[in-house]
Image (cartoon, grey):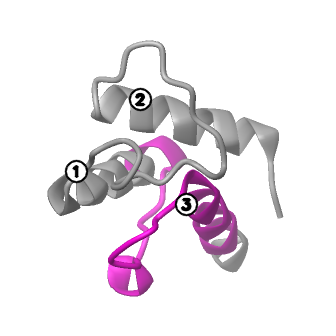
Amino acid sequence: MEDAGNLERIQRVIAETLALTDPDLSRETRVKEDLGADSMQVITIIISLDEEFDTEFDTVDLPKENVTIGWIEDFVARTLASKG
């Protein structure tokens, strides 16, 4: 389900959205807990991913806590596959 290209694009969007300098982002990085993003920033990341992947992501299933970059990558892959 993982695509290295997608992971790099997701990492770039997160770094840009959160204005991170020299980010060390992995699949295990937690967006809120490790990067300090608040709920609105997580939504902004999803909206930016909508634009990056030219689709619309449904945020209904977005967890309140422990949103990792890996979870986002899997979420993107599932959504793109279902719209396929």
Residue annotated with mark 1: 41
Whichever of labels 2 and 1 marks the residue nearer the N terminus, that label is 2
The quadrant of the image that shows the C terminus is bottom right
For residue 47, above or below residue 22: below
Q: Quick one: label 1 or label 3, which is nearer the N terminus?
A: 1
Q: Is residue 66 above or below residue 73?
A: below
Pick the front one: 51 or 9:
9
Q: Secondary structure at mark 2?
A: helix
- Mark 2 and mark 3 lie on one chain; the one further toward the N terminus is 2
Residue marked by disc 2: 15
Alpha carbons under labels 1 and 3: distance apart: 14 Å
**Which mark, residue 72?**
3
Range drawn in magenta: 51-80
Question: What is the crowding at mark 3: few (fewer than 14 residues within 10 Å), some, or many (at least 20)?
Answer: many
Quadrant for residue 78, please give it: bottom right
Spatial separation of the CA atoms under disc 2 and disc 3: 14 Å
Q: Position of residue 20 (x, y in %)?
A: 35, 23
Q: Residue at x 22, y 50 (%)?
A: 41
Label 1 sits on what residue type?
A: Gln
Q: Is residue 32 above or below residue 7?
A: below
Is there CB contact under 8 Å for labels 2 and 1?
no
Image check: 57 left or right of 73? left
Q: Amino acid at mark 2?
A: Ala
| Spot occupied by residue 11 in the image (x, y as percentages of width and height) | 54, 36
Residue located 48% across and 51% down the image = 54
